[in-house]
Image (cartoon, rainbow, N blue to C red):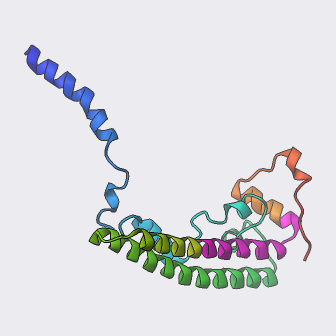
Amino acid sequence: MRILISGLIVLSLAGPVVADNVSPYRGQINTEIRGLSDQEVSDLREGRGMGRARAAELNGYPGPRHVLDAARAGQLALTPEQTRAAERLFDGMAREARSLGDKILREEQGLEGEFRAGRISEADLNGRTLRIAVLEGKLRAVHLRAHIAMRAALSPSEIQQYNAIRGYEVPPDQQQHQHHPRH
């Protein structure tokens, strides 16, 4: 009986150590492109932002998708012109983002394929990762540009209302530093 209890104690102590060594990537072994989650693949295909425009979003530059969502939910009143502008910005951004996302996915698939085949070279690695980085930079710029253009279509009070809807609060000591161009 003592041996059984001692064995259980040893196993219970070893369990967390074994669990800590399990990779967080284990679920990606069977994804379409190893190294990208199914969600990342879907986000790239659909042109979603994936947090790429946070620098704009968190500094008073609303995104067209979220502006449209807030307007459709009755939380943000837009003029018909502003609604059309937001739709135009979102559609253009999404179209360009989907195109870049498809290019990124092709490059990621090629990179992963070279690793899978065991034939990746240093030169190939450098070229492929550089191409991916350039495409990801372009994708981020697409999303950030849409935020800049959306801000120009809104008044300072609409931006303030948007920020409140999104749950962003600007500390009082930083409020005087925010500049809102008029349209």
* Location of residue 18 in the rendering, given as x and y in whole percent from the top left corner: 27, 38
The answer, for residue 32, to whether it is visible in the render is: no
Foreground: 156 or 119? 119
* Location of residue 132 in the rendering, given as x and y in whole percent from the top left corner: 52, 73
Q: Which stretch did the figure color magenta?
A: 137-158
Foreground: 10 or 181? 10
Please identify the quarter of the rendering in which residue 139 is found. Answer: bottom right
Please identify the quarter of the rendering in which residue 118 is found. Answer: bottom left
Please identify the quarter of the rendering in which residue 156 is found. Answer: bottom right
Asked whether, in this view, residue 77 is left or right of residue 32, the answer is right
Residue at left offset 73%, top offset 79%: 86
Task: Find the residue positioned furthest to the left.
Answer: 1
* Location of residue 60 in the rendering, given as x and y in whole percent from the top left corner: 79, 61
Quarter of the rendering occupied by the C terminus: bottom right
The answer, for residue 133, to whether it is visible in the render is: yes
Vertical order, 142 against 55 (above or below): below
Taking the magenta stretch, the answer to whether it contains residue 24 is no
Task: Find the residue positioned furthest to the top.
Answer: 2
Name the chief secondary structure element in magenta.
helix
Label count reads 0
Taking the magenta stretch, the answer to whether it contains residue 146 is yes
Vertical order, 160 against 137 (above or below): above
Quarter of the rendering occupied by the N terminus: top left
Residue at left offset 59%, top offset 79%: 97
Asked whether, in this view, residue 23 is left or right of residue 175, the answer is left
Foreground: 111 or 126? 126
Residue at left offset 33%, top offset 68%: 115
* Location of residue 106 in the rendering, given as x and y in whole percent from the top left corner: 43, 80
